[in-house]
Image: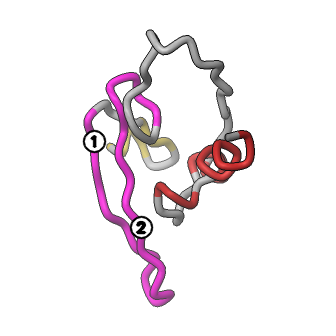
Amino acid sequence: MLLDNPREYRLHSGATGQNRIPGSGVQWTYRINADGFRGEEFDLQSGSKRILFVGHSYTFDWGVNPQDTLPRALERVLA
């Protein structure tokens, strides 16, 4: 993620990172795919149905590792 201004962040394709919340012991990793979304690349040729999550840091799952995000949890429930 890159800081665009003091109040706004923008996701850049291919970005990866590891963050932590100071003093909490919480740390997590993230990856931004080629389309600018958090997670793995989409296989648009598979014919699978998609659900788009739109929102802010709660939707991004700030502070949560990839396998524990809301989209991954829903994917497991619907599988």
All told, the count of numbered labels is: 2
In-image side of 58 versus 10 (left or right): right
Quarter in which the C terminus is drawn: top right
Q: Alpha-carbon distance for marks 1 and 2? A: 14 Å
Q: Is 20 part of what is drawn in magenta?
A: yes
Residue visible at 45% across and 87% down in the picture: 25
SS class, disc 1:
loop
Question: Where does label 1 land, which residue?
Answer: 15
- 43 w.r.t. 76: above or below: above
Q: What's the mark number on residue 28?
A: 2
Q: Amino acid at mark 2?
A: Trp
x and y percentages locating residue 57 in the rendered image: 60, 51
> What residue range appears in magenta?
14-37
Depth check, front residue: 59 or 8: 59
Depth check, front residue: 29 or 44: 44
Q: Earlier in the sequence, mark 1 or mark 2?
A: 1
x and y percentages locating residue 76 in the rendered image: 65, 49
Q: Quadrant of residue 39?
A: top left
Depth check, front residue: 33 or 55: 33
Residue visible at 64% across and 42% down in the picture: 75
SS class, disc 2:
strand
- 9 w.r.t. 47: above or below: below
Q: Quadrant of residue 12?
A: top left
Residue visible at 59% across and 54% down in the picture: 69
Q: What's the mark number on residue 70?
A: none
